Image: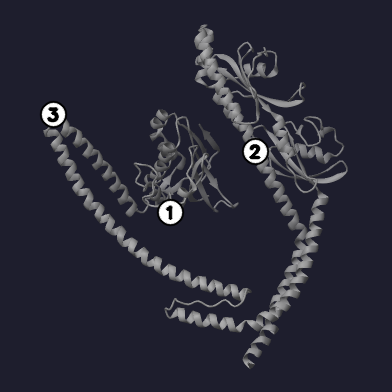
């Protein structure tokens, strides 16, 4: 009893200062730093929402550029032009119907297009499809700016207008156009997409930071084209008396990301801005500086309250904790000693719901986990032995398979005129080849060799592997889209093993998509540091727009011999996972039924090699 009393008072005398003094010091420092912390948090929220929205707007116009490129190079469009040139009415109508369907699909794919129009070299609307369907009226628009400027461009030219207003419904839109050249390099028309700028305005107006924060956007000339309180071009930064607002617009014109304080309508504000590179625009999110201070004062008050309450509760809780601490701790020590002696059948009855109760529950779970780990180790040893045995069995299977195949080939040659023998020998040979391929994959899975690493250009390896499937993709009418980042340095890896991973992923994607589907392969450099030698990752993504993988199957796709295909062995993905792990990387998958499947291959890399600019192939 004296011992307990002595320990109790020692805990009170020594632990109380050790706990209370750090809490008081942390509370003081937290109070001093609250203003800066709140500012960083709000700025971080502001910048994250800003960059996400800027990317969303940029994606709209980037996709529009890709659509214009695709439409202006359609073979159907050239066929339509030739049919009109030679006055082949039937072919002209046929190609016109095809183009209307294609334009309609492009419009149905996005909500940002008002219409897609093809104008001939004279400026007459030949084909026009709007959100409501094909237009019945066609106008001559050869005097409009977009047509005159686009007609004077070469095949690589791209025109986009300022923000226009359709007075009939006070609808804002933007024109993006690209010239159409025939195979003889003759300018034969213009493809025009009218982008619904009202949808862009809705995106900008939807940004809310704090109570009174909002967003606005300027074009490449520093003109305000999107604002929750003004229509496009209504707010003139150059005419505003405060120079800070004009300086903000000038900094936004540079296409950089940054922060700027300024005065607007008698109030000091802070704005974060980020570029929309596809259009040369810049998006800004602004918030009154007063909101920063209010949030900081509120945090400051809460910190003081928490520190005071924590000090009181610490003193009271420590007294109770120290009194009840010894008995459960002693039980834990005794049980630990028995476990150290090899007795894993230990379970301590939980008598409290406090931290000691949680510690007791954790101890019980630990004992159960130790028992399970012991059993798993035993099973792992059995699996290793089974793997060695399986490799030997696979070798023993391959040798008689070769002998059987040789005998069948000999029989087939000796009896070339016997139809029955030809039929059944061919069937046997096919099954022997299938079994031999299975044995080969099984051997590769059971004895994965260490990678023979050499400096390798991963992007070139991706393109090389993709070429193997070009013919198969053409037969199935599947399109490959590449998004390859040339900032990726040379990687030390085994190109043959890495090609095996890419072959498995691309082959699975080809088998998953239906005719007319698409497979997107992208590579990117993922970093979270600012120094050149910071460890980074290269991420390769293979995305198909197939039916997707059900959730019940997704968690099993890397298990050996698991396959949903009739001819699959179920070893491709496990083998690929093993190769990725041998390279120090990972291979993961995500899928949504009806939306396709993504495989992510991540490989480690050091940022000590020069890169290039980001490129895109389609």
Query: CB under 8 Å between callouts 3 and 2?
Result: no
Q: Nearer the viewer, residue 317 or 585?
A: 317
Nearer to us of marks 3 and 2 is 3
The residue depicted at 55 percent of the width and 71 percent of the height is 362
Residue at the far left in the pictured view: 414
User: Which quadrant of the figure has residue 132?
Assistant: top right
Question: Mark 2 highlights which residue?
Answer: 56
313 vs 369, left or right, is right
Sequence-wise, the earlier of marks 1 and 2 is 2
Labels in figure, total = 3
Above or below for 276 versus 559: above
> Mark 3 or mark 1, which has the lower sequence index?
3
Q: Which residue is mark 3?
A: 417
User: Which label sits in the foreground, 1 or 2?
Assistant: 2
Query: Please, which residue is most extreme toward the bottom here?
Result: 2
In depth, the one of 158 and 205 nearer the eye is 205
Q: Position of residue 80 (x, y in %)?
A: 53, 14
Residue bearing the label numbered 1: 581
């Amino acid at each position: 009893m004296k011992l307990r009393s002595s320990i109790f008072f020692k805990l009170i005398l020594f632990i109380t200062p050790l706990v209370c003094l750090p809490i008081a010091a942390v509370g003081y420092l937290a109070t001093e730093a609250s203003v800066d912390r709140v500012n960083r948090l709000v700025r971080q929220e502001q910048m994250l929402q800003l960059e996400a929205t800027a990317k969303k707007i940029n994606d709209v116009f980037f996709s529009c550029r890709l659509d214009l490129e695709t439409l202006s190079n359609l073979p159907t469009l050239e066929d339509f032009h030739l049919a009109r040139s030679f006055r082949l009415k039937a072919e002209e109508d046929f190609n016109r119907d095809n183009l209307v369907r294609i334009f309609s699909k492009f419009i149905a794919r996005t909500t940002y297009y008002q219409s897609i129009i093809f104008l001939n070299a004279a400026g007459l609307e030949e084909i026009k499809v709007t959100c409501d369907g094909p237009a019945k009226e066609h106008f001559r628009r050869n005097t409009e700016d977009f047509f005159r400027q686009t007609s004077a461009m070469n095949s690589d030219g791209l025109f986009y207008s300022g923000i226009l207003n359709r007075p009939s419904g006070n609808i804002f839109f933007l024109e993006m156009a690209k010239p159409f050249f025939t195979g003889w390099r003759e300018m034969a028309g213009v493809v025009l997409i009218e982008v619904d700028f009202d949808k862009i305005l809705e995106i900008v107006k939807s940004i809310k930071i704090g109570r009174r924060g909002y967003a606005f956007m300027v074009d490449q000339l520093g003109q305000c084209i999107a604002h929750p309180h003004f229509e496009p071009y209504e707010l003139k930064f150059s005419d505003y008396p405060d120079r800070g607002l004009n300086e903000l617009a000038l900094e936004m014109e540079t296409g950089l990301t940054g922060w700027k304080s300024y005065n607007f309508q008698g109030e000091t504000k802070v704005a974060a801005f980020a570029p929309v590179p596809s259009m040369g625009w810049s998006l800004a999110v602004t918030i009154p500086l007063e909101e920063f201070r209010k949030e900081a004062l509120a945090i400051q008050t809460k910190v003081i309250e928490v520190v005071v309450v924590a000090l009181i509760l610490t003193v009271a809780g420590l007294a109770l904790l120290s009194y009840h601490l010894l008995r459960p701790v002693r039980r834990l020590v005794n049980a630990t000693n028995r476990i150290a002696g090899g007795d894993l059948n230990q379970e301590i009855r939980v008598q409290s719901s406090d931290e000691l109760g949680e510690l007791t529950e954790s101890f019980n779970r630990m004992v159960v986990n130790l028992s399970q780990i012991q059993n798993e180790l035993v099973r792992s040893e059995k699996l290793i032995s089974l793997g060695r045995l399986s490799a030997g069995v696979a070798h023993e299977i391959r040798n008689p398979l070769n002998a059987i195949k040789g005998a069948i080939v000999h029989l087939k040659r000796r009896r070339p005129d016997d139809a029955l023998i030809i039929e059944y020998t061919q069937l046997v040979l096919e099954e022997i080849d299938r079994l031999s391929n299975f044995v080969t994959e099984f051997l590769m899975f059971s004895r994965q060799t260490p990678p023979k690493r050499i400096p390798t250009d991963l992007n070139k390896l991706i393109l090389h592997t993709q070429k193997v499937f070009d013919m198969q993709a053409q037969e199935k009418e599947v399109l490959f889209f590449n998004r390859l980042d040339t900032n990726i340095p040379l990687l030390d890896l085994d190109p043959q093993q890495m090609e095996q991973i890419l072959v498995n992923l691309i082959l699975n994607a080809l088998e998953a998509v239906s005719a007319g589907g698409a497979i997107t392969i992208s590579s990117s450099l993922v970093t979270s540091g600012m120094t050149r030698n910071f460890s980074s990752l290269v991420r390769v993504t293979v995305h198909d727009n197939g039916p997707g993988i059900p959730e019940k199957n997704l968690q099993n796709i890397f298990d050996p011999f698991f396959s949903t295909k009739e001819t699959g062995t179920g070893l491709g993905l496990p083998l690929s996972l093993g190769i990725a792990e041998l390279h120090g990387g990972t291979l993961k998958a995500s899928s949504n039924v009806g939306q396709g499947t993504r495989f992510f291959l991540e490989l480690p890399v050091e940022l000590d090699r020069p890169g290039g600019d980001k490129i895109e192939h389609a």
